[in-house]
Amino acid sequence: MKIGTFHIGSSFVDLLTSGVLNRVLISDLNLWAAPVALLSALRYLLAPLSIWAGYRSDTRPIFGMHRLPYIWAGRLPMLLSLPLLPVITVMLAADPNSILAWTLAVFSFMIYGVGTLISGSTYMALVRDTAPPERRGQALSIVQIFLIVSFPIAGVVYGLMMPVYDPGTFWVITLTGMGIAAFCFFFSLLGEERPGQSIVADTPTEHVPFPQLLREMWADRRTRLFFVFMALGAASAFAQDAVLEPFGGQVFDLPAGDTTLFNAYWGAGVVLSLLTTVFITRHRQAHEQTGTTIIGLVLTALPLALLGFVSLTKAEILLIPTLFLFGVGFGIYTIGAVSLLMAMTSDSRAGAYLGLWTIAQLLFRGIGIFLGGVIRDVAYIITQSYTIAYASVFFLEAIGLFACIILILKVDVPSFARSVGNVRTPAANLAAAVD
């Protein structure tokens, strides 16, 4: 739980870049969604860095440590890039076509993205390394819950601090987010790895050249299919990421404070379903969670389709319940997918495999975010209707998630788990923590 507080900091800085800033630029400053979505997607489009960072942390310790130097090498630039966000909004408010403003925006998001990718897979590897083999699924689940629970909390905090966009207030919430994140990063990582401590001694890393390692991993059909499953799921589940809050502003005329709370509504559903799911599945092993994943996919896709209907009919009364239901499905899907991800990871190549799955999630999450903005803009140009534009995004997301069900049924996760010795890894669960 201590190391999981790392993700409290992650949620506070991520919401600034993926939620608050997008709302301000698209809805309050009335910029096109596609370039704003591309900014949000930039960090994810650099995702191949994550597998390189994971491989380096497996094979090239720095100051006698495998993980912490790489994590801090990513998190510090992330924090230092954030003060540019309020500057960018002021410059774009004065001139939406300012080359300098867009250059600063690209620079800020590139630095933020590189930092995220260098530290993301190495942090996951640290969590896995520091947990006993029989508790790794549980450990990853607890850490994931910290991330998901923190997003609605951050949304409430930012919504209360800035109910209506104001440049001065945006400065305040940016500095507040930076401070909270810096404290959480330091507290969570303190003492988790010491120089000379061999955290991977029980499963020595194979020193295979990086290109050869990639070829060996990709040669397995199960790895390829699981990669496609993770990629399509990430693109489909997050295509609304850059347009959800602008959707509330442009379809229902809601102020910034109200749309920031969207994260709290769907986050509450996530928390409820996460806790319920881990209790129900607490005796299942990680490779036995395909059924849980399919249920989660269905229950995530249906609310997205309903959200498209809400947009078309402007049925505001259904908006909050639909967001809550989306969170419920997403929580179930998360538990299932995280468990399968752990089963599809080799002990001796944990950093590399987790880097590969990070690519699948982040790269295609970024592609999904960008496509969400493009679909919204193209649909609006064709129809001149915000309701149809946003509904198009939600309906296509639902179709993509239904397609993921076919893919996961083709992946033989149990056989992969047996081949790498992961069949004894428990399913991700919280209930075991108090057994």
Image (cartoon, helix red, strand yellow):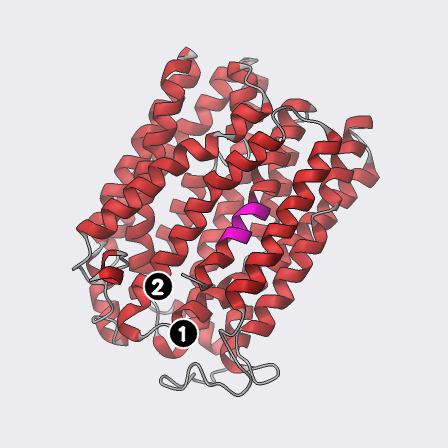
Looking at the image, residue 354 lies above or below residue 243: below
Q: Quadrant of residue 34?
A: top right
Q: Which mark is residue 130?
A: 1
Q: Is residue 224 visible?
A: no
The answer to the question of whether label 2 and label 1 lie on touching residues, with beta carbons closer than 8 A, is yes
Secondary structure beneath label 1 = helix
Q: Residue at x 59, y 47 (%)?
A: 13
Looking at the image, residue 340 lies above or below residue 318: below
Q: Is residue 211 visible?
A: yes
Q: What x and y, as percent, mark residue 399?
A: 34, 34
Does 331 sit left or right of 295 as displayed? right
Image quarter in which the C terminus is found: bottom left
Q: Which mark is residue 139?
A: 2
Q: Earlier in the sequence, mark 2 or mark 1?
A: 1
Magenta-span inclusion, residue 167:
no
Write down the region rendered in magenta. 8-14
